[in-house]
């Protein structure tokens, strides 16, 4: 658990309503906490597949004949499950947060607490890192991602300052970026604003919202009847996509209705939104913003 303390562990696995002989997928393996809990509840004929594109996470592989770890981005979930001759599954878990390990390793560049190379790539083979975005994106493009993904009202000013500063010297590290933007970081709000800036860049580096959309669109064809989807999100951009797709099967607009007023929405929500208890937040502060939504295939 030193790699990553799994959030909403029991609740997210309970949400899957695990059948002993079922086939399940953990699309965000990380430290393997959620996967281990699923395996505890599976019988000898159950199967668990997990996805993770981070080489560090692959070192946590579980030795269990029921378990298969796939070193790929979960946007390709259907393709790689088909490779393993799996067309439909009983349940899918997605814990969308950055792992504690990624935040705690300074050289990965995810954290605002440490000085490290501006990297932020979850997949180390990816060509575009945070450094490329900060040093080569146009002022307009930077402002756009800071506004859309960081929800920063003064995104244009921040982008302008970054572009002006990099003309003198490339911005290579977390603390360099922090120094460049110091005038936008009043002491009382420094942590919050920096977190929004880093979140925006990280989402762009890893195409996180595109990945989530592609993943969710595959759910109706991948889940068996009564199959369950259990998704933990950590910021409003992700949560809104998940909530909206469960409600409408779309990311914008409203579903069309037939002459009887019925709409063809593929999923339906199960239960209410679940958030961590005060006790869990006390033990693991990173759980404070987590939201768990559960859905099943509408029959």
Image (cartoon, rainbow, N blue to C red):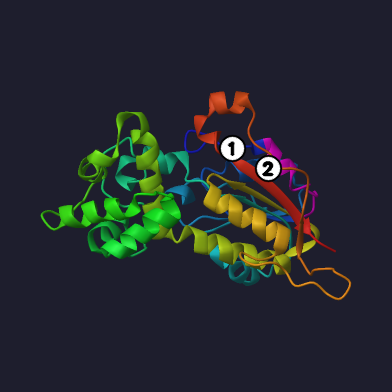
Secondary structure of the residue carrying tag 1 is: loop
- Start and end of the magenta stretch? 10-22
Mark 2 / mark 1, whichever is N-terminal: 1
Q: Position of residue 247 (x, y in %)?
A: 72, 58
Identify the residue at horizontal 55%, vertical 38% (top origin): 289
Query: Image height check: is 163 above or below 222?
Result: above
Return the x and y of residue 267 as percentages of the image width and height: 75, 60
**Residue 28 is at least partly visible in this image:** no
Asked if residue 148 lies left or right of residue 159, the reply is right
Are circles 2 and 1 on residues that touch, CB within 8 Å? Answer: yes
Image height check: is 72 above or below 97?
below
Measured along the vertical axis of the image, is residue 110 above or below residue 261?
above
10 Å crowding of disc 1: few (<14), some (14-19), many (20+): many
Q: What secondary structure prevails in the magenta region? A: loop
What residue is at 61 percent from the left and 23 percent from the top?
279
Q: x, y percentage for residue 214?
A: 57, 66
Which residue is the extreme one toward the bottom? 259
**Side of 154 relative to 23 (left or right):** left
Total marks placed: 2
Q: Give the residue at mark 1.
A: 7
Indicate the quadrant where residue 168 lies.
bottom left
Label 2 secondary element: helix
Position of the C terminus, as image quadrant, is: bottom right
Q: Gap in Å between the C-alphas at discs 2 and 1?
A: 8 Å
Which residue in the structure is indicated by mark 2? 12
Q: Residue furthest left?
A: 168
**Is residue 12 on the magenta stretch?**
yes
């Amino acid at each position: 658990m030193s790699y990553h303390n799994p959030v909403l562990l029991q609740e997210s696995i309970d949400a899957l309503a695990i059948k002993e002989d079922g086939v399940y997928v953990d699309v965000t393996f990380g430290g393997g906490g959620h996967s281990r809990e699923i395996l505890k509840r599976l019988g000898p004929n159950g199967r668990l597949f997990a996805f993770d594109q981070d080489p560090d996470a692959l070192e946590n592989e579980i030795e269990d004949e029921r378990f298969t770890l796939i070193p790929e981005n979960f946007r390709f979930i259907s393709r790689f499950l088909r490779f393993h001759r799996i067309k439909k599954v009983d349940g899918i878990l997605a814990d969308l947060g950055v792992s504690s390990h990624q935040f705690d390793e300074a050289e990965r560049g995810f954290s605002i607490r440490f000085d490290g190379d501006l990297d932020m790539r979850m997949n180390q083979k990816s060509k575009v890192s945070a450094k490329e975005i900060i040093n080569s994106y146009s002022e307009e493009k930077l402002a756009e991602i800071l506004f859309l993904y960081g929800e920063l009202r003064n995104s244009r000013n921040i982008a302008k300052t970054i572009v002006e500063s990099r003309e003198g010297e490339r911005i290579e590290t977390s603390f360099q970026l922090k120094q460049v933007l110091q005038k936008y970081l009043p002491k009382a709000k420094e942590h919050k604003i920096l977190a929004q800036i880093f979140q925006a860049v990280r989402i762009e580096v890893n195409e996180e919202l595109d990945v989530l959309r592609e993943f969710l669109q595959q759910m109706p064809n991948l889940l068996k009847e009564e199959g369950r989807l259990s998704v933990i999100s950590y910021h409003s951009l992700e949560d809104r996509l998940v909530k909206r797709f469960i409600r409408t099967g779309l990311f914008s607009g409203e579903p069309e209705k037939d002459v009887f007023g019925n709409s063809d929405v593929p999923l339906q929500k199960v239960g209410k939104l679940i958030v961590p208890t005060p006790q869990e937040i006390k033990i693991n502060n990173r759980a404070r913003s987590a939201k768990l939504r559960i859905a099943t295939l509408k029959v």
